Image (cartoon, rainbow, N blue to C red):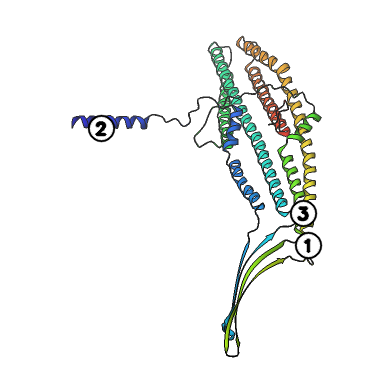
Amino acid sequence: MATTAFRGARLAVAVALSLLSPVPVFAEPHPVSPQQAVAAALNSNPELVSLRKEAGVLDAAAVRAGVIPNPTLELEAATGALTGSSDDNNLSLGISQEFLLGDKRNKRRAVAERDQAAFRWLLADRERLLAEQVQGAYCDVLLAQERLGLARRAIELNRQLLQVAEDRLAAGDIPELEMYLVKVELTRSEGSLIALQRGLLDSRAKLFTLMALAPGESPALSGAFEAKDVPAKGVVDLKQVALQNRPDLKALQATLGKSDAEVALAEAEGIPNLTAGVAVSRDASSMEIGSVEGRETAYTIGLKLSMPIPVFDSNKAGQQEARAKRSSAEVRLQGAVANVEREVETAHASLVNAEKVRVLYRSNILGQLDENLKLTQEAYRLGEVGIVAVIEEQKKYFEVSDNYLAALHAREMAFNRLQSAVAADINGGAQ
């Protein structure tokens, strides 16, 4: 009895400890890289998953397009019982088959196959756009994290400045107002940190939604803004790569091919189908010659051919509709080609401009700005400048640093946008 009580107490303690211990929401052994984020989104995004499921509808349509029409069984019976000739009757059993003329079966299959191809390229284009969205959301998170680090740096510098101001106030070198000005700056920087933390949460939530992570999963991110080189290929070469690789253009090309197949099918639909049938009949009758009554049974085999006469309808309306769709698909393809070329031009120009801004900050501004801040802080410590000069220099330092982060973000976004517009990596490989 004592042993049982001891085991029960030990079990209760274990349960209590398990309830009090923190439960890890997400255990991620390694931080998530941009490539892993894109892969997770492409694998688990609900919209893409549903589109992949819808591909089965087109597969069924392709199977249906190649199906041969079913034969028709015909059974006919007649009796003379209602007309006073009960011994006279007829029984006929036949089967008929419709034959598709004009190669309709293969042409229907061609339409279905081109529809499948267009859908596959459309799915690939959705994947391309989602990858661009994930990369953009990842860059937004990186920018929010870098700004958060800059805000913590501002708080640290303001605390150091407050310590110097308090020391100088105790020594009687400055009025009390200067210390209060530093306290205001410290409070303002702490408030900015809280706002940036909220912005980081929003950016991470957007990224994790695109990645289709379960609620509560919050992995760390391992990416950073990288100084990638501007592609060596010119705009003309990048346009050619885009025209060859863009899945939305390939989808429109497949749609145009489908329209051509629909025109051919519509012309074939103007040819009527042939229906052939064979039937076996049994005719039973009675006759009376004099006072002698006899019965006669006859068996016959018949062949039946039937075909509609295209006098009033030879599918002219269907042919007109198919040609109109074909013209519309051709115009859409031409417009899409122009839009892709314009998109590549814009993305390339944005990348070049963003790179110029980044280089300008990196080579000419940041180093001098950091040196100016150190000199101003040291001058205040020595009593050579007032507190306002230090505060203004710090504001300038963090404002320019924030602009530099924005320039890095813009450069990364422009790089991703160009890569998405070309539908290939910068080295020219297809994505």
Q: Position of residue 59 (x, y in %)?
A: 63, 47
Vertical comparison of 88 with 46: above or below: below
Mark 3 Cα-neighbour bin, 10 Å: few <14, some 14–19, many ≥20: many
Question: What's the CA distance linking mark 2 and mark 1?
Answer: 88 Å
- Residue at the spot of label 3: 322
Name the N-terminal-most of marks 2 and 1: 2
Marks 2 and 1 in Cβ contact (< 8 Å): no
- The front one of 408 and 217 is 217
x%, y% of residue 130? Answer: 64, 37
What residue is drawn where x is 59% and y is 19%? Answer: 178
Where residue 248 sits: x, y (%)?
A: 72, 40
- Label 1 neighbourhood size at 10 Å, few (<14), some (14-19), many (20+)? some
Q: Earlier in the sequence, mark 2 or mark 3?
A: 2
Residue at image position (62%, 13%) is 377
Tell me which corner region of the image, top left, top right, bottom left or bottom right, holds residue 79: bottom right
Kindly report the distance in space between the C-alpha atoms of the residues bearing marks 2 and 3: 80 Å
378 relative to 200, above or below: above
Along the line of sight, the residue nearer the viewer: 33 or 227? 33
Q: In the image, what residue type sits under mark 3?
A: Ala
Nearest to the observer: residue 34 or residue 269: 269
Q: How many neighbours does mark 2 have within 10 angstroms: few (below 14), some (14-19), or many (20 or more)?
A: few
Q: Is residue 206 visible?
A: no
The N terminus lies in quadrant:
top left
Secondary structure, mark 1, is loop
- Residue corresponding to mark 2: 8
Which-is-in-front pick, marks 3 and 1? 1
What residue occupies the far right of the structure in this picture? 236
Looking at the image, which is closer to me, 301 or 383? 301
The residue pinned by badge 1 equals 314
Which residue is situated farthest in the bottom direction here? Answer: 290
Label 3 vs 1, first from the N-terminus = 1
Looking at the rendered structure, the kind of residue marked 1 is Ser
